Image (cartoon, rainbow, N blue to C red):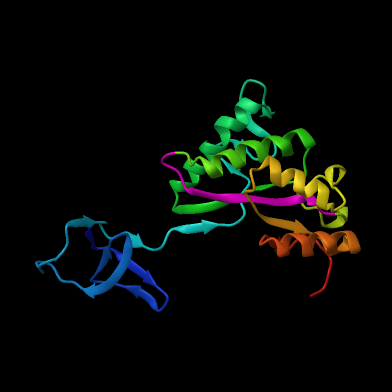
Amino acid sequence: MKIGIINGKICTPSGVRYNSILIIEDGRIKSIQKFHKGAKILADKIIDVGDNYILPGFFDTHCHGAGLCETAYGKYDYKQNRFCATDKNYESGIPEILRKHSLHGTTSMLLSICATSDENINRFMKYGGFYVKNKPENSAKFLGLDIEGIFLKNPAYAGAQRPEFFKKPDIKYFDKLMKLSNNTIKKVLVVPEWGEHGCRLIKYITKNGIIAGVGHSGATY
């Protein structure tokens, strides 16, 4: 199927294109052509975007929540005036996060977990992994899980993370989380301040095709 998108400001690597038509064929961008009013368009479907910007969907590699849902603490309860971390809230909250972000141009994403209790980490792994494998409808594509805060060390670089929940990097513990997530962890932040413990886990995850995240560290390049 060939689709023509007209009357938009098309964002490209070389600048914004005006008075042009974007041709999409079989789900892929085929070309950008000059367009003027009244010109014949050879397409099966025409979409008029009314002078809005046209740009690729966003890929969010690091995100903790949306729509009053948070990956480490569950869903916000107005009556109790706090976040409530229950299995039910994680089960309904993760799809809500994905749907909310899809409304603002994010078409694919990872979800991140910060330093929190073992119970909440396990809930995130369980329900996050489930929804990576069983995509919610009308939402951004859920590509995997991101561990941010668990393997931090120095409270001076904690930011919004809670140091009482920091853990020493451990391959067995990581394997447990990977199993809970149904093998859907894609990125893990391990600070080098842990020395050999950190280096072992970094080597282990990268050997298995997982990205080693960077941040919350005083290490030099």
Q: Position of residue 101 (x, y in %)?
A: 49, 47
The residue nearer to you, when weighing 9 against 191, is: 191
Position of 10 relative to 97 (above/below): below
Q: Position of residue 214 (x, y in %)?
A: 73, 63
Extreme residue in the top direction = 79
Left or right: 173 in relation to 143: right
Left or right: 112 in relation to 37: right
Q: Position of residue 189 (x, y in %)?
A: 74, 57
Extreme residue in the bottom direction = 14
Asked which quadrant contains residue 118, the reply is: top right
The residue nearer to you, when weighing 104 against 40, is: 40
Q: Which residue sits at x=70%, y=47%?
A: 178
Asked whether the viewer can see residue 213, the reply is no
Position of 21 relative to 180 (above/below): below
The residue stretch that appears in magenta: 137-152
Does the segment drawn in magenta span residue 150? yes
Asked which quadrant contains residue 47, the reply is: bottom left
Position of 17 relative to 146 (above/below): below
Does the segment drawn in magenta span residue 32? no
